[in-house]
Amino acid sequence: MDFFNYRNNELYCEDVPAEKIAREVGTPAYVYSTATLLRHYHQIADAFAPLKAMVCYSIKSCGNIHILRLLREQGCGFDVTSGGELFRALKAGGDPKKIIYAGVGKTDREIADGINAGIAAFNLESEAEIENIDRVAQSIGKTAIGAIRINPDVDAKSHDKTTTGRKGDKFGVDIERAERVFEQYRNLKNLRIGGVHIHIGSPVYAIQPYVDSVLKMTALIDRLTERGHKIEWFDLGGGFAVNYENPDQALPVTEHAKAIIPLLKDKSYRIALEPGRYIAGNSAILLTTVLYRKQSGEKKYVIVDAGMNDLIRPTLYESYHHIWPVKPGAENVPPQRSRSFVPKEGETVDVVGPICESGDYLARNRPLPQTRRGDLLAVFTAGAYGFSMSSNYNNRPRAPEVLVDGDRYRIIRRRETLDDLISAELV
C-alpha cells in the first residue's frame, strides 16, 4: 500500500497535491512519501520480529541521505555495495554494526574503509576475495568479519538481469563447494568467517524460491556445524516484490514471513535481511510534463520531459510502470488502487522521452486518457532503482527529489544545473 491517491479528481501525495509540487519544483521530479517508506519498513521489521532479524536497507535501491536518516531513526541498518554507499550510510548516522558490505568487486581501498569503519560483516563472494580481505586486514593490522555468499542454485523467476541465485550466475560460491571453501579458510588469521549469505534475485513474486533456498542453507549450516564451524548469523538477502501492475501482484511480506519463520525460529544463529525494493518501490512517483504529441504511421506518441536518463527501468528491464494523468478529469479517475482502468475516450500511445535513442520510452502501447501539451503525468512505483540509476546522458541535469510528510514537503536533492554538468571537468 502507498499514500498516493486521487481526491477531487486530482492526485495527492499524502496530503499535498502533486500539481502543487510540480508547479513549485518543476518537472521531471521524484516525489517520495514518508508514510509509505515507514509503513513498508515496519511491515518487514514487524513480520520478521519473531526471529529478531536485523533489517539492513539496500542503499542501491534508493540512497538519498535524507531517506537513509529517516530509516536509521527507526532502527534500520544498511546493506552497501560500494565505498560510496558506505560513505552515505555513515553520513546518515548509520550504526557500523548494522552495516553489511556486499558486492563481487570490492577494491582494496573499499575493503580497508569497511574494516576501519567497524562494519558488521563483508559478504564474501569468492575464494579470491576471501584471500584478499584477509591480506588487506593484515596490512592494516586489524581483523575483518565475513559471511560467505552461497549460490543455492534456486531460480527465483525474476528478470534474467536480476536473477542471482542460479548456478553459473555472477554472484556467490556454488553450494556444492561451499563446505570445501569453509574448510579451506577456517584458520585465517585476519578474517573471521562467521556467517552465510544468500540473495536469489529481485523482484521475487513467489514464496517457494525462498523456502527452497532456506531449506538448502539450513541443511548446509547443520553440516558445517557438525564439522566444528561456528555459524553466528544467516543473511537471507532481500528481493521481495512490489506492485507494479496491479494491487494484488505481489504478496505482502507477511506471507513470506509466515513461510520462512517456522524454518528458522529454533535456530541458534542470528538472522539478517537486506530489503530495498520492498521499502522504497511504492514510495515514489516520477512527475513529468507532456511536451508534444505526434503520430508516425499508425503509432501515436506522447512525448514527455522525463527520459531514460531519469528512469531507465523500462528500457533496461522491459519493466512496467503505471502512468496516469495527475488531473485526469472526473470520468477518468480510476477506482482506488486500480491500474487496469480503461480510460473513457482514451487512446493507445507510447509514452517516450526526449533522449536521442529509440529505446527511450516509459511505456509502450499504453491505454491513456487523451493528453495535450502541458498536462502532468505521474509514473508510479518509481522509488526503487529510479533516481539511483538515473544519469546525465545527453547532458541532461538530473531531477530533484522531494520528500512529502503529511501536508508538507521539502526538497531533499535540488535539481542539477548546467554548471553542475561540467563542474568536475574544470581542472
Image (cartoon, grey):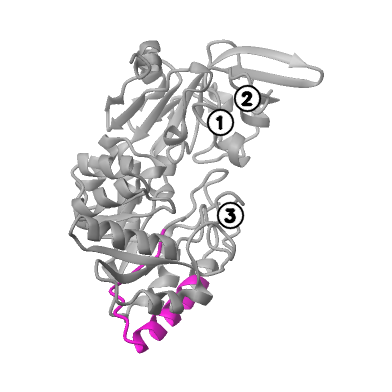
Residue type of the residue flagged with mark 2: Val
Q: Is residue 364 magenta?
A: no
- Mark 3 surroundings within 10 Å by alpha-carbon count, few (fewer than 14), some (14 through 19), many (20 or more): some
Q: Which residue is mark 3?
A: 158
Q: Determine whether label 1 and label 2 are within 8 Å by CB.
A: yes
Q: Which residue is mark 1?
A: 323
Q: Horizontally, is 78 left or right of 8 in the view?
A: left
Report, in whole angstroms, how far the alpha carbon at label 2 lies from the one at label 3: 25 Å
Residue type of the residue flagged with mark 3: Ser
Image position of 256 with respect to 274: above or below? below
Q: Residue at 57%, 43% (x, y): give it.
A: 245
Name which of mark 2 and mark 3 comes first in the sequence: 3
Q: Which residue is mark 2?
A: 351
Residue type of the residue flagged with mark 1: Ile
Q: Is residue 236 magenta?
A: yes
Place residue 182 in its image quadrant: bottom left
Q: Horizontally, is 147 left or right of 200 in the view?
A: left
- Mark 3 element type: loop
- Mark 2 surroundings within 10 Å by alpha-carbon count, few (fewer than 14), some (14 through 19), many (20 or more): many
Image position of 48 with respect to 203: above or below? below
Q: Position of residue 103 (x, y in %)?
A: 41, 52
Name which of mark 3 and mark 1 comes first in the sequence: 3
The magenta segment is 212-237
Quarter of the image that includes the C terminus: top left
Q: Horizontally, is 241 left or right of 160 in the view?
A: left
